[in-house]
Amino acid sequence: QVELVESGGDLVQPGGSLRLSCAASGSIRTRTMAWYRQAPGETRDVVAQITTLGSMTKYADSVKGRFTISRDNVERMVYLQMDSLKPEDTAVYYCNNGRSDWPWGPGTQVTVSS
């Protein structure tokens, strides 16, 4: 019953950067962690994943080279550094474990617009 709270979303111009944070109420040490996003009328899709010790990461093709996922198991935090943002990145962003079997947090809104 780990609770997740995302933060850091904002309105940003195309080409800008944001860093999203995910705070977990319990241990994340043994879980692959991931960031997901959902635009209105679209499915919730995984955009980035990171293994338990941060040794390996994986990204959706649409964000590869622009986004970086990281984690701090002691602080129970997961981060998503987003650079070179595009309007198509506009969505609500969520974190969860790689199996998405914890309750979803509130998400954080990212809007990329001029």
Image (spheres, rainbow, N blue to C red):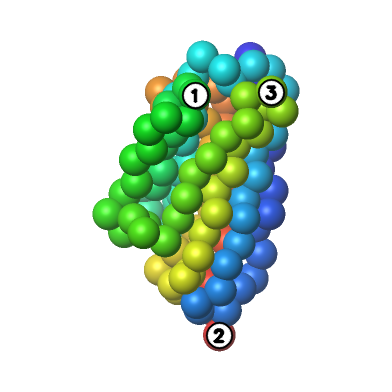
Task: Determine contact: label 1, label 2, CB under 8 Å.
Answer: no
Disc nearer the start of the sequence (3/1): 1
Q: How far apart in space, not on screen, are marks 1 and 2 (Cα)?
A: 38 Å
Which part of the image, by quadrant, shows the N terminus? top right
Identify the amino acid type marked 3.
Val
Identify the residue at image location x=42%, y=30%.
55
N-terminal label among 2 and 3: 3
Quick check: 53 left or right of 11?
Answer: left
Badge 3 density bin: few <14, some 14–19, many ≥20, Cα 10 Å: few
Q: Mark 3 points at which residue?
A: 74
* Image point (59%, 20%), residue name: 28
Query: What residue does disc 1 label?
Result: 53
Q: Look at discs 1 and 2 and give the one toward the viewer.
A: 1
In the rendered image, which residue does mark 2 sit on?
114
Q: Is residue 60 above or below residue 50?
A: below
Q: Residues within 10 Å of mark 1 (few under 14, many from 20)?
A: some
